[in-house]
Amino acid sequence: MTQKFKNYINGEWVDSVTKETFESRMPADWSKVIGVFPKSNKEDVDLAVKAAKEAFKSWKKVPAAKRGELLGKVGDIMVKRKEELARLMTEEMGKIMKEARGDTQEGIDTAYYAFGEGRRFFGRTSPSELPNKVAITFLRPIGVAGLITPWNFPIAIPTWKMFPALLSGNTVVLKPASDTPALATKLVEIMEEAGFPKGVVNLVHGPGGSVGNAILEHNDVGVVSFTGSSEVGRHIASVCGRTLKKVSLELGGKNAQIVMDDADIDLALDGVLFGAFGTAGQRCTATSRLILHEKIYDLFIEKLVKRTEDLKLGYPWDESIDVGPVINEASMKKILEYVKIGKEEGAKLVTGGYRYEEGVCKNGWFVKPTIFVDVKPKMRIEQEEIFGPVLSVIKVNSFEESIDVLNDVEYGLSSSIYTKNVNLAFKAIEDIDTGITYVNGPTIGAECHLPFGGTKNTGNGHREGGWTVYEIFTEQKTVYIDYSGKLQKAQIDISIEK
């Protein structure tokens, strides 16, 4: 019997007021249904925001260290349920087991990091320009945080947003991706088990057009955090801008790995294989462009094609599998359309580029890992985010040209360079226009205690992860304390007594 799931509002598991539902299915075998979920609307969002707003009155007064202790409990429970969560992720999202465990571990790490931040929720103390006066700052919560999360990291990204928001003293309304609603439900169940008070955490399932927009437009939502496409991000910024709502946007990428002629070729091969085809290329940090120095171009491609063709596709819960399915049929069709575009543009397809339907893959959305060579800058497959296992290879004749090619896209999320020359490595760090640069590592592999985000059309300047994410979910409050016993006029010239 198919399991039926519910929304979580004000500490209760409830159906949508619409009574409508939608299904979540396995991308590896579309005939298998994960569960049935409420197809919610604005009324459900109104109920969730009302509960969150009421809970905020008391939650904001809970000491940060005590809020952190609850998040520490969440981490403990996640450790116990790690394998269960990872297995569900392989079924609902399609990540292979090793990657699903890593996604879950990222959530665990984020819980424990937030637990520690409860004891480090620091403001600043500053000298005043006047005598007998002190200046201090505090971090204050904003109120209700609306969180809209994607399907490709269905545990890690909700925790990246939810845990800092809660530690900061906000209450939350979470709208997870409709492709991975079961994982969001399991995460909220864990938070309920940890003991979060009623109304502090709320979960509303449903489409972006109804649930997502209702969150954006709600006057009682004070901050919105979104991860997804740049196109949707622009819409969100526009809607939130009308009410001057604080908004954080983590958007697209077109990330490149540079391999110089002095690089460790085998190490660089390992990096691009993982970066391009890990998670079936469905990461905002995925390596979608490979920039090769002309001296190693032919050798590198020969080795790369052979190793790519050795990658094994299949059910992602099979521990021997290298590449799982893409998330759904629409995504598969988009990827294959880009393969067609690449051929029409004159790039050379050397492997992959088709739906894979052999053996157990016949009922799923599998795309054979794809490599185009002789790709030229400005081709669409070199410029546009594909979000699938498609790699474009570009030849360059110098370090300077490699940097120009890497930077010449509208995105600026992640980047990578393989070289043994420390001078080139540091020049790359300085000259590459991205928020993240790896040296002798792939473009993927963010760590929860460090800032994550990018430049240009990758976002609106905020950084998730680490200490910087708390800037998204707090306001700075400056306090002046004058203990002189008299009126002192700031911004008025005063002379120093001799």
Image (cartoon, rainbow, N blue to C red):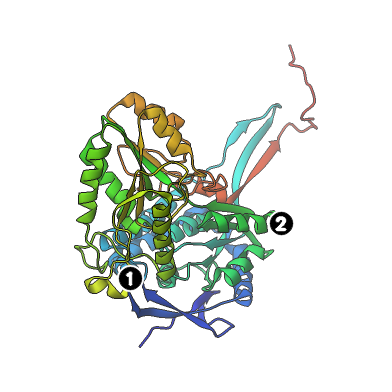
Measured in 3D between alpha carbons, the distance from the residue under mark 2 to the one under mark 1, in whole angstroms, is 39 Å
- Position of the C terminus, as image quadrant, is top right
- Position of residue 230 in the picture relative to residue 132 (left or right): left
Q: Amino acid at mark 2?
A: Arg
Q: Earlier in the sequence, mark 2 or mark 1?
A: 1
State the image quarter where residue 193 is shown.
Answer: bottom left
Q: Position of residue 448 (x, y in %)?
A: 40, 49
Q: Position of residue 318 (x, y in %)?
A: 22, 67
**Which residue of the protein is positioned furthest toward the top in this rendering?**
498
- Position of the N terminus, as image quadrant, is bottom left
Q: Amino acid at mark 1?
A: Leu
Q: Is residue 61 visible?
A: no
Q: Nearer the viewer, residue 342 or 464?
A: 342
Q: Is residue 52 visible?
A: yes
Q: Nearer the viewer, residue 117 or 41?
A: 41
Residue positioned 21% across, 61% down in the render: 312
Tag 1 residue? 88
> Could you tell me if the residues under marks 2 and 1 are in contact, i.e. CB atoms within 8 Å?
no
Q: Position of residue 218 (x, y in %)?
A: 67, 65
- Quick check: 105 above or below 407? below
Q: Nearer the viewer, residue 442 or 374?
A: 374
Residue positioned 30% across, 46% down in the render: 272
- Quick check: 319 above or below 127? below
Tag 2 residue? 242
Residue positioned 56% across, 44% down in the render: 461
Q: Secondary structure at mark 2?
A: helix
State the image quarter where residue 108 is shown.
Answer: bottom left
Q: Position of residue 48 (x, y in %)?
A: 59, 72
